[in-house]
Structure formats: C-alpha cells, structure tokens
Amino acid sequence: MGDRMGVAGPMTCVELVAALTVELERDPVDADWALRLVGMTVDGLRDIAHQGDTASWGLFAAAPGLERLPVTWATLVAGVIGHHARIWTGDAPPWCDIAPLPTPWAPWRPGRVPRRPIKGLRDLNVLLDASWFETV
C-alpha cells in the first residue's frame, strides 16, 4: 500500500477501525471511501499472508476495537477480515467470530442485491459483491 500519511506498510485492523470511525463520522451515508479502506486492509492482509510474515500477522490480527463502529460496519470488517484470513492462512483472528446482523444490509448501493455475494459475509447478512474487492 505504500506510504499513507507518513506510515509505511499495510494498514492494520486497529488502524482500519480508527480510519473508518473518522470516515463514518464525517459522512455516514457515502460508503465508497470506507469500503476502499477495507479493501486496502484486505490487500495488506493478502501480502502479509503470502509472505508468511508471522510478526506482521500478529500486529495485523490484533483486536481492533470493533465496538467503536456501527454494528453494521463492525460486522462487515469482522466478516471480510475473517473470510480472507481463512482463505489465505486457514484461520482467522478470534475477534472475527461475530453474530450475523438481524436483517440483510448492503453498504454500497443499498437495495442492490449483489450478483456474487461473498459467502462469509452473506452468512452474516452483509451483502457485498465479491467483484468489489477485485476492482478496488
């Protein structure tokens, strides 16, 4: 991800939650930049997993304080990170085990049903198309 605001390296989940908190307070309706932050974090996770960097993985996987986010976004973050961690490492941080939302929620383009919903998110009632992470 390069250098972002003077911090080199991939964004950790703690940094992601802090950035999302600021972004969602600034504009709770526009999910575009918030989803891009999640995508950048997933990219960092993939790089760390593929490099087998266990020290960075430990920093990356630290509990991020999801309680600071709206429950919808906390569920999305836990679901996305858990889903990708399981794919790339076979396991997910314990904080990724989260209860599903009571009703379906789409963070991007509300009301639009994704063509290829991410199974790990669909099970949590978060509707996000898998292609979104391919284009971010």
Image: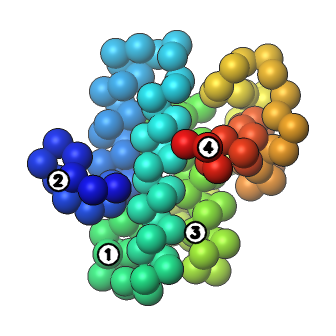
| Disc 4 packing (10 Å; few <14; some 14–19; many ≥20) | few
Q: Residue at x 30, y 39 (%)?
A: 18
Quarter of the image for residue 81 reads: bottom right
Say if 120 sits above or below 18 in the image.
Answer: below
Name which of mark 4 and mark 3 comes first in the sequence: 3
- What residue type is disc 4 on? Thr
Do callouts 4 and 2 mark residues in contact (Cβ within 8 Å)? no
Q: Which mark is residue 132?
A: none
Q: Residue at x 17, y 42 (%)?
A: 5
| Residue on which disc 2 sits | 7
| Residue on which disc 1 sits | 56
Relative horizontal placement of residue 106, taking residue 14 as reference (left or right): right
Q: Quadrant of the N terminus?
A: bottom left
Quarter of the image for residue 128 reads: top right
Say if 128 sits above or below 60 in the image.
Answer: above
Q: Nearer the viewer, residue 114 or 103?
A: 114
| Residue on which disc 4 sits | 135
Note whether residue 121 is visible. Answer: yes
Q: Is disc 2 placed on a helix, strand or loop?
A: strand
- What residue type is disc 2 on? Val
| Residue on which disc 3 sits | 85
Relative horizontal placement of residue 31, taking residue 133 as reference (left or right): left
Say if 81 sits above or below 49 in the image.
Answer: above
How far apart, in angstroms, are the residues tagged by discs 2 and 1? 14 Å
- What residue type is disc 1 on? Ser
Do callouts 2 and 3 mark residues in contact (Cβ within 8 Å)? no
How far apart, in angstroms, are the residues tagged by discs 4 and 1? 25 Å
Residue 98: x percent and y percent? 62, 52
Residue 130: x percent and y percent? 73, 48
Do callouts 4 and 1 mark residues in contact (Cβ within 8 Å)? no
Name which of mark 3 and mark 1 comes first in the sequence: 1
